[in-house]
Amino acid sequence: MPQFFLNKRLIILLVSIIILVALIGFSLKEREKLTWPEQFVKDTIGLVQTAVSRPTHYVAGFFDNLKDLQNTYTENKELKKRLDELARLESDVQMLEKENAELREILDKKESLSDFEPIQATVVGRNPDRWNELLTINKGTKDGIEQDMPVLTANGLIGKVKSTSQLTSTVQLLSSMDPTNRISAEIQADGESYFGLIEGYDKDKGLLLLKGIPYDAKIKKGQNVVSSGMGGVFPKNLPIGKVVDVTPAEYGLTQTAFVKPGANFYDIEHVMVVKRSMVKPEPEDMIDDEEEEL
Amino acid sequence: MRKFLLPLLLLLLFISESIFIELFPKGLLDEARIIVPRFLMITLLFLTIYGPKKYGIIYSFIFGLLFDVVYTEIIGIYLFIFPLVSYIVSKLMKILQTNIVMVSLVTIIGVILLEMGVYEMNFLIHQTSMDFSSFVSLRLIPTVIFNLVITCIVAYPLKKHFENLAASLDV
């Protein structure tokens, strides 16, 4: 028996397993903030990453440009065709915006759920093992980034900020499996809109799952899905994707729509972190008595 | 100056893994298959075998922690598995002879152990719901083939470098 305890290796193994379980437990619980040593390490590595990734992206971009040159002619033709439509669209938008502003003035409603301030950022790193899809971007709390802010590319929503440090922050993509990764979304059907929650990702098909749509909603293929702004953090009308398929959910009480994300989750370089202009409601406000009056 | 060469090399490899993932042309593979570059693990295993063994395990520990903090945000998985694989490989090399083909094969076995270990951990803490057979076909096989090619390319230079390092430390 004494020999068993004197076995140094066994004791080291047991102690390290205990530490392992403790550390994993510590990092899995929902944390408001990273500890300062973590933030420090992330910032330091982030600086090195920025220094290294800029030149490599530049070189890679050069080769991409060469490839693009090959189909410039056909692209140019196509784009010229679109340009005419764009001019018309632009005048429409201007007119509508003006009208909207005037109407808002009449109603005395200054803020809207869809107002936001964008913060531009560049991706400097990505989790190589890709079990949980995380990106590192080169903006942090110093630039006004906070936890849970939505992150977009030019084509649509890609995820939300998982944690922040001074100079960098970590973005969790919509494609990672995390039960807390939920976004309140809205399907824009003609004239009507249906609400649901983006919950989960089908890895094989590359589609997002939009759950909890009312069973009698008439949803068609190709309808747009945008964020609804009801979650408290996300502004309204951020593009997410298009409906591809609809199936009744378990027990048939609701429907689940498969949404093809507008953004590509593999090829991300520049992103935009979105700060909602409208104040986020505090949980205490929502259970207040006054709520019923509103 | 020479003292800083090794940590600097490892740090560069550490960052290159994430840059590789960003720049890897996705058209080359179909989207569901995933290649995980393990430059750091390969180098650490060569360091354990050819260089001073103690260095190998200590650096595995340090870079395991760094990997967890910077990339995965779940502290513990790589912190535990990197040194464990280095240790198992160093034990394995006591039985086997140290020629370069053998070392490359053992390195690949190390990479397989690492991949399986990380998968099992993620499965246990519900970070993934992938079953074992699709893990093997979608992740393990492409990863192993890719890292085998990389090992074949870097084996000889790494061997030379770490043998020199071990020699310079002995003197």
Image (cartoon, coloured by chain):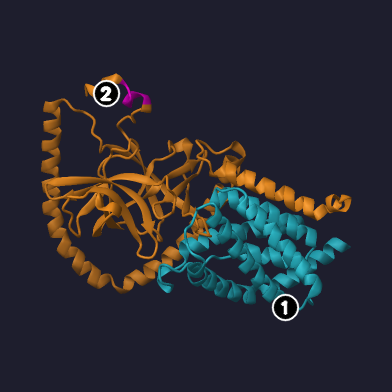
Chain colours: A orange, B cyan
Quick one: label 2, few (<14), some, or many (20+) residues within 10 Å? Answer: few
Q: Quadrant of the C terminus of chain A?
A: top left
Q: Horizontal placement of A54 versus B144: left or right?
A: left
Res. B102 mark: 1
**Residue B31 in picture, x, y percent from top left:** 40, 68
Secondary structure of the residue carrying numbered label 1: helix
Kindly tell me whether residue A252 is visible in this rendering. Answer: yes
Residue B48 vs A293, above or below: the answer is: below
Please tell me whether residue B25 belongs to the stretch shown in magenta.
Answer: no
Q: CA distance from mark 2 to mark 1?
A: 72 Å
Residue at image position (18%, 45%) is A193
Tell me where the magenta segment starts and ends, as one range. Answer: A284-288
Residue at image position (62%, 63%) is B114
* Quadrant position of residue B168: bottom right
Identify the residue position indicated by label 2 in the image. A291
Residue B127 vs A38, above or below: the answer is: below
Q: Horizontal placement of A44 versus B134: left or right?
A: right
Residues indicated by labels 2 and 1 sit on the same polypeptide chain: no
**Residue A155 in picture, x, y percent from top left:** 30, 54
* Quadrant position of residue A67: bottom left
The chain to which mark 2 is attached is A
Residue at image position (66%, 60%) is B9
The chain to which mark 1 is attached is B
